Amino acid sequence: DSLDPLGELDPWGERIAEDLLFDGLLRRSAAGAPWVEPALADRCEVDSPGAVKVVECHLRGGIEFSDGRPLEADDVVYSLSYGLDPRRTWARDRIGLSSLKQVEIVDKPAKTRGDADPGRWIRITFDRREPLALELIASVMIVPRRAHRERSKSFGRTPIG
């Protein structure tokens, strides 16, 4: 009935959405710890290995959705923070992001290890140390904010990934 990765999906819909239509900042990897690799991000930095409270990811350039619109940082913030709305706690809990506190666009990482690149860094903050933070982030698929908001009821039938 729906292929909206931010909505409730049946198991087959989830598999199709995650494997064929959408990408996240990170994707799962069997190559070894930390069990994720960059997808829409080209790199991510964490505040503390193993027990993460802050993750900062730099967006790759030149990425477009299937409708030709470029991926923007606002799309990532919208998708990751979708479950922060009190009316959508089910969305956050469904993928285990109950400890997600804030998602924001920043100019550079807080520890300044990465280069400043205004509008291309995303800071994801958890309200407690989260050992599976990167895995949890990989479970969120990114949708185009404007298309998802404008067509919230029909987006799952004609998704843009």
Image: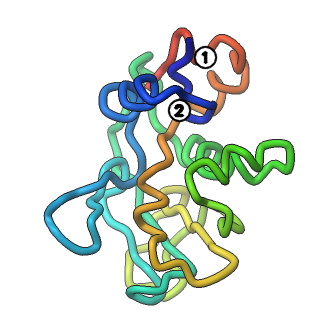
Identify the residue at image location x=72%, y=45%: 90
* 40 relative to 30 in the view: left or right: right
The answer to which of marks 1 and 2 sits earlier in the sequence is: 2
Q: Around disc 2, counting alpha carbons within 10 Å, would you say few (fewer than 14), some (14 to 19), or many (20 or more)? A: many
Q: Could you say which quadrant of the image residue 106 lies in? A: bottom right
The residue that disc 1 covers is 155
Q: Secondary structure at mark 1?
A: loop
Identify the coloring: rainbow
* Viewer-closest of 79 and 116: 79
* 43 relative to 68 in the view: left or right: left
The residue that disc 2 covers is 5
* Viewer-closest of 95 and 123: 95
Q: Position of residue 85 (x, y in %)?
A: 81, 48
* 5 relative to 152 in the view: left or right: left
Please determine whether, in this image, residue 79 is positioned above or below residue 112: above
Identify the residue at image location x=61%, y=60%: 97
* Viewer-closest of 142 and 75: 142
Q: Quadrant of the C terminus?
A: top left
Tag 1 near tag 2, CB within 8 Å: no
